[in-house]
Amino acid sequence: MRLFYIRFPIFQAVPGKLSWTLLAEIIRIDDELERNFYMAETVNENWSSRQLIQQKERGLFMQLALSKNKKQILALAQKGNTVEKPEDIIKSSYTLDFLNIPEIKYSENSLEDALIKNLEHFLLELGKGFAFVSRQYRLTVDNTNYYVDLVFYHIILKCYVVIDLKIGKVRHEDIGQMNLYLGYFAIDKNNAGDNPPIGIILAKEKDEVMVQYAMYGNNNNLFVSKYQMYLPDVEDLRKLLYKKINL
């Protein structure tokens, strides 16, 4: 109760929707930005205490914040993760620890199979608003068949989200291929009312400079993110975040 008073000296500042069980988890968070984020997001998403603990352990706030600038980070802490534009659903890194596959000797097919078998967990990692559509979606251009690894529809942004998986480092030709996929979905797949599709290349590694050059003048809805097979060290993420804020 003493800690509760220290965190919230003005009781009216506490959202009425939060139970004591949820507040007991939130007041344990020392950092004010993180605490405000998890409080807002718990209300926005109607999280249970189990979901709140899980997201804290996965470092959700830091993972989202590292993709944003200082102004966006402060807004994220105040309002939670509001989704209004493509950048709002993108993380710089995704954690796939729930797959329980070894770090070595896995293929793109086995990675895709594992994601489909653990689709509920993957949807949670992707974030709010994703609905699964298809895997290995075939599209034909100039009598050549291409296969998109994973296709989702985002019910908030009202657009298709195309995901291409890469078990190694992303290459410039991968970016060109994703741009082709986005053109196909925009021209041939979109229905009336759909917004331009979003493309995410999910790779084990990426060279920031190469990606910057390869995406010069390219589609603003195309993103390259990394994935890792283990939970990140939350303290390391926190240090990276505050280094970014204080630059």
Image (spheres, rainbow, N blue to C red):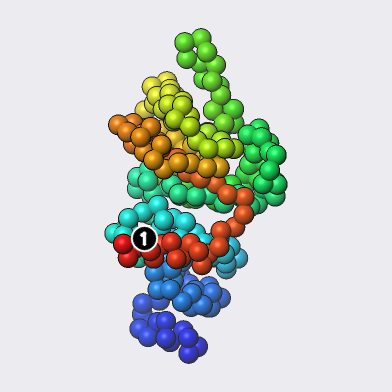
Taking 202 as reference, is 190 above or below it?
A: above
Residue 72, picture quadrant: bottom left
Q: Residue 77: percent from the left, percent from the top?
A: 38, 64
Side of 73 where 25 appears, left or right: right
Disc 1 residue type (three-letter): Lys
Q: Residue at x 44, y 30 (%)?
A: 172
Side of 99 where 179 appears, left or right: left
Quadrant position of the C terminus in the picture: bottom left
At mark 1, the secondary structure is helix
- How many residues crowd mark 1 within 10 Å: few (<14), some (14–19), many (20+)? some
Q: Which residue is mark 1?
A: 244
Q: Residue 170: percent from the left, percent from the top?
A: 50, 35
Name the residue nearer the viewer: 68 or 86.
Answer: 68
Name the residue nearer the viewer: 80 or 145.
Answer: 145
Q: Residue at x 63, y 34 (%)?
A: 108
Side of 222 where 231 appears, left or right: right
Taking 121 as reference, is 25 above or below it?
A: below
